[in-house]
Amino acid sequence: ETGVTQSPTHLIKTRGQQVTLRCSSQSGHNTVSWYQQALGQGPQFIFQYYREEENGRGNFPPRFSGLQFPNYSSELNVNALELDDSALYLCASSSSQQVNYGYTFGSGTRLTVV
Amino acid sequence: AQSVTQPDIHITVSEGASLELRCNYSYGATPYLFWYVQSPGQGLQLLLKYFSGDTLVQGIKGFEAEFKRSQSSFNLRKPSVHWSDAAEYFCAVGSQAGNMLTFGGGTRLMVKP
């Protein structure tokens, strides 16, 4: 079975621009969660998608938005990029929205905002 | 609100020595607790988890952790560290709603030959 795939692996954007990050969930998984990991910190929960609906959101502004598609892949969109958005963005998929079912994390997308 | 504290930002141990990484959590009910490891440029890999039952849980790569409710702790241990264990380790607690993890700040482990 394939794991969680994220694309791109790295990208550089200019402040004020918009970015879309992509995540292909592991086969058989219907839930995708997104986390932001700033340099030297632990990951922070952005939001979760379960069966194409947002199922919980962390303390992130509305310019962070997402989508989940019928094949359970997902996108994270960030508008009006700020310098502080520079981070590693991690996608995790699971077979349930509950944490006790276990998450499989991707290797992340490293976003640099200049 | 739930929170996780990992008091040690960096730890250096010699190869073959024992290891203990500390984790303290704050949570209003019986927590779901996790330890993850992250190698450079990689995502997170689950080492072990605790939901209920036996307070000493075994994980992959020879790691174990002990849940101590009275101390609000979930420390990670390994009896003999290998050079390949050098990585960043994160403790996390699961939410009541069950849909998010709250991570600590991480502990970077370095292994001396």
Image (cartoon, coloured by chain):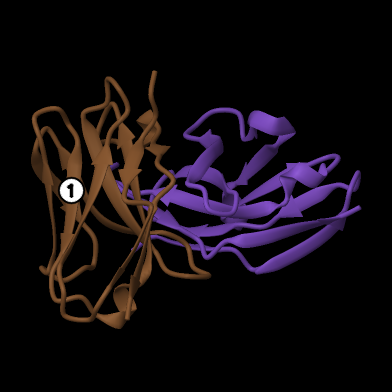
Chain colours: A brown, B purple
Q: Is residue A15 above or below residue B104?
A: below
- Label 1 residue SS: strand
Measuring 31% from the left and 36% from the top, which residue is drawn there? A93
Q: Which residue is mark 1?
A: A75
Is there any visible trace of residue B93 in the rendered image? yes
| Quadrant housing the C terminus of chain A | bottom left
Measuring 82% from the left and 42% from the top, which residue is drawn there? B82
Q: Where is residue A38? Give x, y as percent.
A: 42, 69
Mark 1 chain = A
Measuring 82% from the left and 44% from the top, which residue is drawn there? B81
Q: Where is residue B49? Give x, y as percent.
A: 52, 36
Is there any visible trace of residue B97 in the rendered image? no
| B44 relative to A76 in the view: left or right | right
Q: Where is residue A12? Give x, y as percent.
A: 32, 69
| B43 relative to A83 in the view: left or right | right
Measuring 73% from the left and 45% from the top, which residue is drawn there? B85
| Quadrant housing the N terminus of chain A | top left
- Occupied quadrant, residue A45: bottom left
Q: Is residue A16 above or below residue B42?
A: below
- Between A66 and B64, which is closer to the camera in this rendering? A66
